[in-house]
Image (spheres, rainbow, N blue to C red):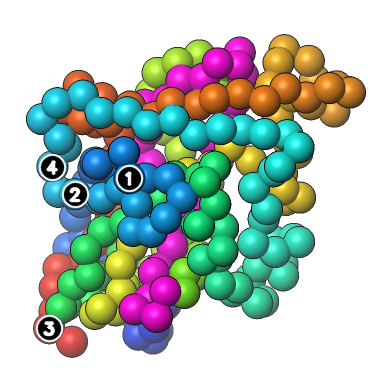
C-alpha cells in the first residue's frame, strides 16, 4: 500500500500499521496550569504520583468555536487554531520540543477520566502541531458523549504525520465545537428540542490513580 507521512512524503508498506510501529503513551500532568494560557499542562512519559484534577466550563451561550465552518474548509485551509487554545474554557496539554522528528503512523486515542455536574456532557479533543512561532495546526480530532463519570476513550483516527524538530504536540480538550457539532443540552432533554440549554462544569482527573493519557502509534527514530 501507499501512504503519506505528513511533512516528509509518500511511502510504501506491506501492512498497516507498520510492523516496526510501537505504542507510546503520554500522560496529562500538571493540570493546574492547563487552562487559558499556553503551554498549559504537560504531556509526560509517566503519570504524576499523586492525584491531580482540573475543571473546565461548558457555556451554551459562549461555545468554543470550530476552527472552520465545516470539515471541508478545515481540510482546505488548515487554519491556525492558536486563538482557541488561549480560551479559558479549554484545557491544553503540551509535550516538549524535540531535537529529533517524531513520526506518528497509525491509530491515536485519548483515554480521559472525566466527570460533570450535568447528567450528559461532551468531550472534544484536538491533537495539534504547535510550531515554534506559536501557530497550532490540526493533526487529528475526535469527540465523545458521556452520561456518567469515569473513563472515556476517544478515538482520533489514524494518521501519518511527522512532528518536526522544534515543534511540540498539543492536546486540547473542550466541551463544545460549534458549528461543526450540535451543542449539548446540559440536561436529559434532546439537544435538538431544548429551548434552554444548561451550563455545566467538567472535571478531568489525572495522576497514577486516574491516568488520563494520549496513546500514539509511532515509528522508531531514523535520524532523517
Query: Between residues 28 and 213, which one lies in front from this camera angle?
Result: 28
Q: Residue drawn at (34%, 78%), measured in percent from left and top?
A: 132
- According to the picture, the residue beneath numbered tag 3 turns out to be 223
Q: Which residues are magenta?
A: 109-134
Looking at the image, residue 13 sits to the left or right of residue 128; the answer is: left
Few, some or many C-alpha atoms within 10 Å of disc 1 (few <14, some 14-19, many ≥20)? Answer: some
Few, some or many C-alpha atoms within 10 Å of disc 4 (few <14, some 14-19, many ≥20)? Answer: some
Few, some or many C-alpha atoms within 10 Å of disc 2 (few <14, some 14-19, many ≥20)? Answer: some
Query: Between residues 189 and 199, which one lies in front from this camera angle?
Result: 199
Q: Residue drawn at (72%, 22%), measured in percent from left and top?
A: 198
- Local SS, label 3: loop
- According to the picture, the residue beneath numbered tag 1 turns out to be 33
Determine if the magenta segment contains residue 127.
Answer: yes
- Local SS, label 4: loop
Percent position (x, y) of residue 178?
72, 48
Comes first in the chain, label 1 or label 4: 1
Look at the image and tell me in which quarter the N terminus lies. bottom left
Comes first in the chain, label 3 or label 2: 2
Comes first in the chain, label 3 or label 4: 4
Q: Is residue 138 visible?
A: yes
Determine if the magenta segment contains residue 65.
Answer: no
Estimate the spatial distance between the alpha carbons at disc 2 and disc 4, rounded to whole Å. 5 Å
Estimate the spatial distance between the alpha carbons at disc 1 and disc 2, rounded to whole Å. 14 Å
Q: Residue drawn at (40%, 50%), measured in percent from left and top?
A: 92
Percent position (x, y) of residue 95?
26, 59
Estimate the spatial distance between the alpha carbons at disc 3 and disc 4, rounded to whole Å. 25 Å
Q: Is residue 198 above or below residue 216?
A: above
Looking at the image, residue 62 sits to the left or right of residue 153; the answer is: right
Comes first in the chain, label 1 or label 2: 1
Q: Residue drawn at (52%, 20%), measured in percent from left and top?
A: 116
Residue 15 is labelled as: none
- According to the picture, the residue beneath numbered tag 4 turns out to be 46
Amino acid at each position: 500500500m501507499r501512504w503519506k507521512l505528513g511533512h516528509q512524503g509518500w511511502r510504501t508498506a506491506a501492512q498497516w500499521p507498520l510492523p516496526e510501529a510501537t505504542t507510546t503513551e503520554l500522560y496529562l500532568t500538571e493540570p493546574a496550569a492547563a487552562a487559558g494560557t499556553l503551554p498549559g499542562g504537560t504531556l509526560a512519559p509517566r503519570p504524576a504520583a499523586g492525584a491531580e484534577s482540573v475543571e473546565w466550563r461548558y457555556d451554551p451561550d459562549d461555545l468554543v468555536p470550530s476552527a472552520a465552518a465545516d470539515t471541508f474548509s478545515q481540510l482546505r485551509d488548515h487554519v491556525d487554531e492558536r486563538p482557541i487554545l488561549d480560551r479559558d474554557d479549554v484545557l491544553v496539554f503540551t509535550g516538549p520540543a524535540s531535537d529529533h522528528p517524531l513520526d506518528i503512523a497509525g491509530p491515536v486515542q485519548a483515554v480521559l477520566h472525566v466527570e460533570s455536574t450535568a447528567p450528559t456532557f461532551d468531550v472534544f479533543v484536538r491533537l495539534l502541531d504547535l510550531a515554534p512561532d506559536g501557530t497550532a495546526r490540526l493533526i487529528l480530532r475526535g469527540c465523545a458523549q458521556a452520561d456518567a463519570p469515569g473513563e472515556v476513550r476517544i478515538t482520533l483516527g489514524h494518521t501519518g504525520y511527522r512532528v518536526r524538530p522544534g515543534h511540540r504536540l498539543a492536546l486540547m480538550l473542550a466541551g463544545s465545537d460549534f458549528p461543526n457539532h450540535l451543542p449539548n443540552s446540559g440536561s436529559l432533554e434532546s439537544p435538538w428540542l431544548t429551548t434552554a440549554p444548561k451550563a455545566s462544569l467538567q472535571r478531568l482527573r489525572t495522576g497514577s490513580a486516574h491516568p488520563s493519557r494520549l496513546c500514539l502509534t509511532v515509528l522508531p527514530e531514523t535520524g532523517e
